[in-house]
Image (cartoon, grey):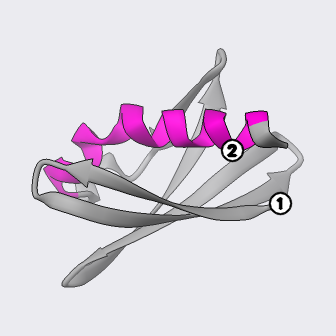
Amino acid sequence: MPHFTKRVITTIGLRTFYFNRIYTVNGAKYHVSVQDGASYYFMMIERNGNWLIDGTKERLPYWVMEAEKELENAIHEHLEKG
């Protein structure tokens, strides 16, 4: 399944994150979106077995950055389910 959602408790409350797996020549990545009045979009990439927010950190609110480990865990759970 290339897409899934995960509800995550962030420092500002419960938020629903939407994950969409995309395939590139450099491997799989996840396009992630979440809303909190505004919509935020970012990519998560795998580095050394860890899924990290890629490149747009300066444009994301602190509560998304603080949830990075929970988002990584959501990806690992999804991949384990196959």
Graded by Cα atoms within 10 Å as few (under 14), some (14 to 19) or many (20 or more), the crowding at tag 1 reads few
Disc 1 secondary structure class: loop
Residue type indicated by callout 1: Met
Determine whether, in the image, residue 4 is placed left or right of residue 66: right
Q: Quadrant of the C terminus?
A: top right
Residue farthest to the front, as pictured:
81
* Marks 2 and 1 close (CB-CB < 8 Å): yes
Determine whether, in the image, residue 48 is placed left or right of residue 80: left
Q: Quadrant of the N terminus?
A: bottom right
Q: Position of residue 52 (x, y in %)?
A: 49, 34
Above or below residue 73? Residue 35 is: below
Determine whether, in the image, residue 39 is placed left or right of residue 71: left
Q: CA distance from mark 2 to mark 1?
A: 9 Å
Q: Is residue 77 magenta?
A: yes
Q: Position of residue 80 (x, y in %)?
A: 76, 33
State whether residue 52 appears in this view. no
Q: Position of residue 72 (x, y in %)?
A: 50, 35
Q: Nearer the viewer, residue 19 or 55?
A: 19
Residue located at (15% from left, 59% from top): 13
Residue located at (61% from left, 41% from top): 75
| Residue holding disc 2 | 78
Q: Nearer the viewer, residue 19 or 22?
A: 19
State whether residue 79 appears in this view. yes
| Residue holding disc 1 | 1
Magenta range = 61-80
Disc 2 secondary structure class: helix
Graded by Cα atoms within 10 Å as few (under 14), some (14 to 19) or many (20 or more), the crowding at tag 2 reads some
